[in-house]
Amino acid sequence: MAARPLRLLACGDVEGKFDALFTRVRAIQKKSGPFDLLLCVGNFFGSTLEAESEWEDYRRGAKKAPIQTCVLGANNQETVKHFQDVDGCELAENITYLGRKGLFTGASGLQIAYLSGTEAQSEPAPAYSFTTKDTASLKSALASSSKFKGVDILLTSPWPKDVWLYGNSPEEVDTKTCGSALVAGLAFALKPRYHFAALEGASYERLPYRNHTVLQENARQVSRFIALSSVGNTSKKKYLYAFNIIPMTSMDPAELVKQPLDVTENPYRISGKDSHRAKQASIIEEEPAAQFFFDLSKQQGKKRFSTGRGDGQHSSPKQPRKPPQPTGPCWFCLASPEVEKHLVVSIGTHCYLALAKGGLTADHILILPIGHYQSVVELSSEVLEEVAKYKAALKKFLKATGKRCVLFERNYRSQHLQLQVVPVPLSCCTTDDLKETFIVQAQEQQIELLEIPEHSDIKQIVQPGVPYFYVELDTGEKLFHRIKKNFPLQFGREVLASEAILNIPTRADWRECRYSREEEETLAKAFRRDFEPFDFSLTD
Ligand SMILES: *[C@@H]1O[C@H](CO)[C@@H](O)[C@H](O)[C@H]1NC(C)=O
Ligand SMILES: *[C@@H]1O[C@H](CO)[C@@H](O)[C@H](O)[C@H]1NC(C)=O
Ligand SMILES: CC(=O)N[C@H]1CO[C@H](CO)[C@@H](O)[C@@H]1O
Ligand SMILES: [Zn+2]
């Protein structure tokens, strides 16, 4: 018993141009058949005399809306007078004010959540605005049940803040000031399949975004955010959007959660959750608790211990810590649309392997955490454990191909942790040669590389946030440099590419090592095939 899809229209700011809107709707219906509902977001009423007199015709019944029309309330003082009943009411035949906030459920089962007005900027909140209290009560009324899956449609007048993150950028809006954080929080919680907004005079259709964490949660329906322009706008920007929808309550669950190819990460992961930032801050606070730091800035070899914050607080090991979130699009968060998935060669639980883009050699590999961590120092123990597993697997693999593995990390001007693994043929040089070359070439550039004990962890040497570079040899020995300023970004590559080691000096700069996408795909495929016998992620 397949439900008939509903045919809906959504419209941006009408600004009192009722005749223009309904003429257009009539023309559309004449051409492509009747629609079930027209949903209007943004300013329905205008404040000009012309707009007022146009409205008089509809209010008195001299003119009529040709379709059931639902509208949101006022966004300014001038138009508050049109919305007498905060719980919603009929404004004219076929024109209904939905109310301040709530859920409208149609006979078909279609669920439309709505929030009228703009976010309050001052106290006391004006009559046409909403506050945290409003969005919190809407969230708890709709989304607190464990059975809650989402709503079909969310209507708000303002855009949600940061909706463009991880997606396509809107034109003509100031991304610094545009959008409401409360609306973002609401959209994050309600997981609408469609979210409409207006007020910016711009039209924008964001790529669909996910509402689940890849690899960690079951798939949920994606959300589409669509911002519409104002009616009769001369610049021909889109103000009407037509779509078909089957209410989620009558949809096949598998069909509902299908992910389109162009789906992106959820833009609200940071700003959306009200207390998320605070929680994140407290996680970072906890991190270095009861840790010891060698202070290498003083004197080589002499260890000074300090107890960090030493308040002995540990988070329960039962609750895996959520990785911090990037503040913008990231090329290496596995869930991010920016990731070049064709370079990925293995995916574990917390980490993954990818071929380095423009690698020094065809088997130059990166070990990366799946979540957003800036450096090894920030990794939780379970992520570190898997990093160690990948290191061991790669070492074994490379040994089998007659190579030793050199690993380095630069935590400086980087966003997402990348452990670079560069294979060096055994026949080319010994581990001691490698070590020597690194030390000598560092000295030439006034970089002090300090040897640190084999079994010590970088975590014990630096505090999170401190920039550093280190290279780890196949014996586990490490050479460490605390970066103060002006560290040559390509240093690790330069040394390995130099005559003394790989002797491919022109490849030191990765930009000189570009491959075409087809070549990259071929290299990744070859690596996957060769690495397979060593890849624990395939068997665990
Ligand atoms: C009001 O809307 C209904 C349903 O969309 C439509 O059938 C009807 O013709 C409309 N009324 C007028 C007067 O156009
Ligand atoms: C088009 O939209 C912009 C922004 O909302 C507005 O300033 C302008 O007056 C509109 N033009 C028309 C003809 O409605
Ligand atoms: C409410 C909810 O479950 N939201 C999820 C939406 O998707 C993001 C990741 O894309 C998750 O972090 C949220 O938990
Ligand atoms: Zn990242």
Image (cartoon, helix red, strand yellow):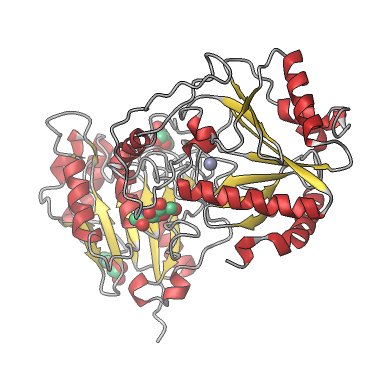
Q: Along the horizontal axis of the image, is 314 left or right of 526?
A: left
- Provide residue 284's location: percent of width, then percent of height: 37, 35
Q: Quadrant of residue 231?
A: top left
- In the displayed orientation, state which residue is furthest to the front: 302
Q: Quadrant of residue 439?
A: top right
Residue at (52, 46) in percent of width and height: 384
Determine whether 57 is above or below 153 in the image: above
Determine whether 216 is above or below 53 in the image: below
Marks counted in the figure total: 0
Q: Can residue 384 be seen here?
A: yes
Q: Quadrant of residue 232?
A: top left
Q: Nearer the viewer, residue 13 or 219?
A: 219
Residue at (46, 46) in percent of width and height: 381
Q: Can residue 98 be seen here?
A: no
Q: Along the horizontal axis of the image, is 220 left or right of 509?
A: left
Q: Quadrant of the C terminus?
A: bottom right
Q: Along the horizontal axis of the image, is 309 left or right of 117?
A: right
Which quarter holds ligand 3?
A: bottom left
Q: Nearer the viewer, residue 368 or 67?
A: 368
Q: Nearer the viewer, residue 442 or 191?
A: 442
- Provide residue 57's location: percent of width, then percent of height: 22, 51
Q: Along the horizontal axis of the image, is 292 left or right of 109?
A: right
Residue at (82, 36) in percent of width and height: 430
- Provide residue 521's location: percent of width, then percent of height: 77, 54
Determine whether 179 is above or below 386 in the image: above
Residue at (50, 34) in percent of width and height: 459
Q: Quadrant of the N terminus?
A: bottom left
- In the displayed orientation, state which residue is furthest to the bottom: 1
- Provide residue 9's location: percent of width, then percent of height: 39, 60
